[in-house]
Amino acid sequence: MSAVMEEEIKRWTARRKSQLVLEIIQGRTSVSEASRQFDLPPSEIESWVDEGKRGLENALRAKPEDVREQYERQLKELQEAYGEAMLELRARKKLASLLGKDET
């Protein structure tokens, strides 16, 4: 870990998160190593890495989206996925009731 990351971290600022994400992307450390070192859940660090990659991709576009557009697009995608999951769940329940199976 870099010298900046060696100090005890009381609050994870965007700057500290980005430094850690950069070290992971560059292969200087791994998610599991960082998780142990900083006593953070691996899923939280992985979400930072995912967000960093999305931000990097957006920054390198010819016409970057602003943050609001990114979140609106992501919200729309999540709403669509939720809707599809609800339709599938309803279809499964309907099929189960037509076949006379218990839903438990």
Image (tube, grey):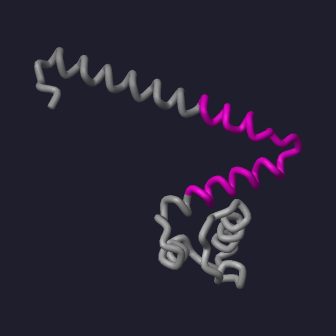
Residue extending furthest toward the top: 98
Q: Relative to 70, say whether 80 is above or below.
A: above
Q: Nearer the viewer, residue 45 or 92?
A: 45
At x 69%, y 56%, the residue is 53
Say whether residue 72 is magenta.
Answer: yes
* Spot occupied by residue 54 in the image (x, y as percentages of width and height): 69, 50
At x 54%, y 33%, the residue is 78
At x 67%, y 69%, the residue is 25
* Spot occupied by residue 14 in the image (x, y as percentages of width and height): 70, 60
Q: Relative to 32, say whether 77 is above or below.
A: above
> Taken as a whole, is the magenta stretch helix, strand or loop?
helix
The total number of labels drawn is: 0
Q: Which residues are magenta?
A: 47-76
Left or right, 99 with reference to 33? left
Residue extending furthest toward the right: 62
Residue extending furthest toward the front: 10
Report which quarter residue 72 is drawn in: top right
Q: Quadrant of the C terminus?
A: top left
* Spot occupied by residue 13 in the image (x, y as percentages of width and height): 68, 62
Q: Quadrant of the N terminus?
A: bottom right
At x 46%, y 64%, the residue is 41
Q: Nearer the viewer, residue 91 or 69?
A: 69
Q: Relative to 3, say whether 82 is above or below.
A: above
Say whether residue 100 is magenta.
Answer: no
* Spot occupied by residue 31 in the image (x, y as percentages of width and height): 54, 70
Left or right, 59 with reference to 48? right
